[in-house]
Amino acid sequence: MPAEPGQPVQNLALMAQQIPALPLTYQRVSQVVADPHATAVHIAEAVAADQGLAMRILQLANSAMYGQVARIDTLTQALSLIGNRQLRDLALGMAVVDLFKDVRAPEIDLRSFWEHSIAVASSARLIAAARGERETERNFVAGLLHDVGIMISAQAQPDRLAQQLRRAREESSLVAFVERADQGFDHAELGAAVLERWRLPQVMIEVVAGHHRPMLTATYARECADVHFSDLLVDALGYGSAGEAIVPPLDTHAWDLCGLPVGQLARIADALEHQVVELTDIFVGAR
Amino acid sequence: MGCAMNRIVAFSMLQPGMVLAEAASIDGQVLLAAGTTLTSAHIAMLGKRGVRSLAVRQQPATATLPARVILELDKQLRAKFVRADLQHPVVKEVYRLALTRRVHQTMRKGAADAR
């Protein structure tokens, strides 16, 4: 059906509006972390209000992602290891995974979708860490959310998305190209619209919006480049799938921005081999 | 993943092409240095000197899969890279890592099926 002029954007806005708000427990954690008077005990209390969240934060603190030798048994220990803002970002990632846990769509396997997302998240985090950055969780969560538009589309229009994914596969084309040709916008724009609705930080919105077109990103070009490259790396290595049948083309300028020597890639691929399955089990639940 | 593992092989199981993980020695005398690729002449010599067993390197991944399997994996992977510029050094390296992972996965699967 040919779209009316102006129709596509309206559809995008409509779809974005259907998405529920982030869970109250996450909002509470976010508030407490933002409060300069709050202590670690207050934050731990806010996390503990959601048992599933608390359990997963502890599992994460004991996972290969943090490489701890000594066991972390309490939320306050986990907090001092992970950091308050970083913990808030990880809680956000878990809240979003939970929000879409009942999505059923042809051509989309939820575990495979999140395995892809978590591998991109880990890779984006490892690239930032290789540059010597310390707050790498932001990159992790931006990577985790980069394809959230696919989930939104899967929930709002499962059959149309399935058609788009099949067409992309038949034409060896990027899913985003097919989406744009079919409906006038792609999952990157849709995801960014929802993140805006949730009032998430600008860096996450820009990374999600620009992961296929990093050249359009102005302020957070480097974070966007990390996720753009990680998406390619992960599709090539074959961790899960968000529906993409081909390895996306590389924006060479984005690669330069990552600031990573080619020789370090094997180390990142090796780290992914050790982390992705464990992290997917923690975020999505064991198989 | 991809880490070199050593295994102890009885003399009767030695084959040309195996690579020594440790020096072959008898009574403190080194007969062959670590890293030597065994030839049939080496094996005959080791037999004469009374060597019973040796530590050899686990064969690298690509050496233990039949060439046609690797070619098939390569073909499948190339189809995924249809929109990627394989001339670019980083894409080339990503391709190499992706093929290595598929080879390892296929080997692990083969080992599991054999059990």
Image: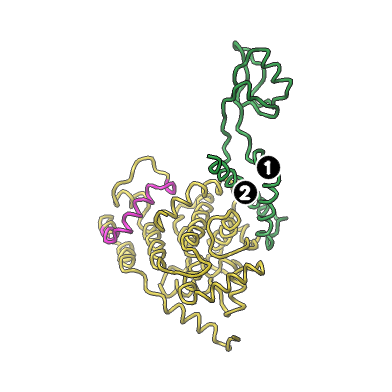
Numbered range of the magenta stretch: A45-66
Amino acid identity at mark 2: Leu
Element assignment for label 2: helix
Q: Colour of chain B?
A: green
Image: A253 above or below B29 = below
Image mark 2: chain = B
Amino acid identity at mark 1: Pro
* Magenta stretch contains residue B16: no
Image: B64 above or below A120 = above
Mark 1, Cα crowd under 10 Å, few <14 / some 14-19 / many 20+, is: few
Please name whichever residue, A114 or B73, is drawn nearer the observer in this view of the structure.
B73
Residue at (66% x, 21% y) in the render: B33
* Magenta stretch contains residue A63: yes
Q: Which residue is mark 2?
A: B97
Please name whichever residue, A145 or A103, is drawn nearer the observer in this view of the structure.
A103
Image: A192 above or below A263 = below
Residue at (35% x, 40% y) in the render: A70
Q: Which residue is mark 1?
A: B66
Image coords of residue A14 (percent x, y): 46, 82
Tell me the colour scheme of the image. by chain
Q: Quadrant of the C terminus of chain A?
A: bottom left
Q: Quadrant of the N terminus of chain A?
A: bottom right
